[in-house]
Image (spheres, helix red, strand yellow):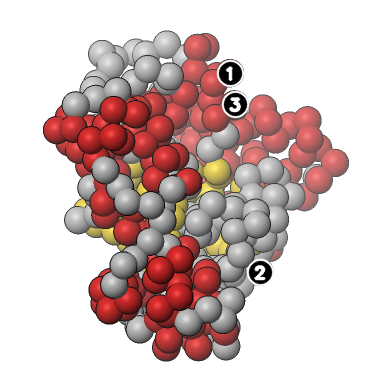
Amino acid sequence: MDQQLRRLRELAERHADRRATETAIPRVSINVALEPTSIRPGLYPPMLCMVLQGAKEVMIGGQRLRYDPASYFIAGLDLPASGRIVEAGPTRPYVSVSLHLNRESLTALVPDVPLHTRAKAEGAGFAVSPVTPQMLGSWLRLLDLLDAPQDIPVLAPMIEREILYRVLQGPQTEVLRGIVRADGRHAQIRLAIAWIRAHYNEPLRVGELAELAGMSAASFHRHFKAATAVSPLQYQKSIRLQEARKLLIGDLDASSAAYAVGYESPSQFSREYARLFGASPARDAVCLRRSCALEAPLAEPSINGQRRPPAGASQSTRPANAKAV
């Protein structure tokens, strides 16, 4: 595996800037960092991220996950999370690759991959698991295409399918299968998440949201927190604050941003904003406008096809602050 990792690092560093870089391969991004970073909150989309050198920590709800070249991170739902690179340096930079998970690709593949173990109940929509030589080999073939871009349209979909197959054969098969199921718990939670994201500035009534998801209020709250590690109200608050940050960088004042995203109390908004982003709305907005805090976020994959917008940037190509690796 050491030789595979070394070759993967060489390919990734050669084809990436010193930041998150969208590649010519659809939904694949590379992140290179020369030093550890502070904690950066954002919204992690469904993705698979693998660290090739260095290490990273992700905080989701009250859970802290660390992954390095021996492991990979996977998320099957849109998750409010905070991440930071914890191991990086000029001579040994942090290097990671990520793949945004495509529901259509999974839907076509899952029926061809029978479960080899007894299915478990759907729990958390994220996990960290050990990498395997087979998975590294698949990633190596995928990144090799960066040196043969003419082959990407034909070969990349097949190798992406191989990577997804390797995950479906591993301990996180339920995370991936939960993305495509139409009748599982994660499908019900996705309905609720979609509503929260579309109506984040409206009052959240858990009973109505539970009815939308087809559960009792108690069952909904329990399953929502099991899948996302946060309560529905905490999820909404994270989305509101992410959206407010984008409004602030557009020159809106803190009070106006607070009301726009659904807060009734500007003082409460300022307290919760500072708790999440580490600075008051006014101070953070000044910092953002000076581009001092706009390095690539820390999630794993950035949104592919185009360079992902930095934290606080416009939502034109992405859902509220989806993160980069």
| Spatial CA span between label 3 and label 1 | 6 Å
Q: Nearer the viewer, mark 2 or mark 3?
A: 3
Say above or below: 141 vs 260: above
Q: Farthest residue to the right: give it.
A: 150
The percent position of residue 36, horizontal first and vertical second, equals 41, 75
- The image quadrant of residue 263 is bottom left
Q: Quadrant of residue 35?
A: bottom left
Judged from the image, the secondary structure of the residue bearing numbered disc 2 is loop
The foreground one among 324 and 57 is 324
Q: Position of residue 10 (x, y in %)?
A: 62, 59
Tell me the mark number nearer the camera, choosing from 2 and 1. 1
Image vertical order of residue 314 relative to residue 11, above or below: below
Residue picked out by circle 3: 104
Residue type for callout 2: Asp
Mark 2 sits on what residue? 17
Whichever of callouts 2 and 1 sits on the residue coming sooner in the sequence is 2
- In x, y percent, where is residue 72? 40, 46
**Rendered residue at 49%/18% (across/down):** 110
The residue nearer to you, when weighing 252 against 286, is 252
Amino acid tagged 3: Glu
Circle 3 SS class? helix
Q: Please, what secondary structure does the residue beneath circle 1 have?
A: helix
- Reading the image, the residue beneath label 1 is 108
- 106 sits to left or right of 275: right
**Quarter holding residue 87:** bottom left
Front position in the image: 28 or 11: 28
Give the CA distance from mark 2 to mark 1: 33 Å
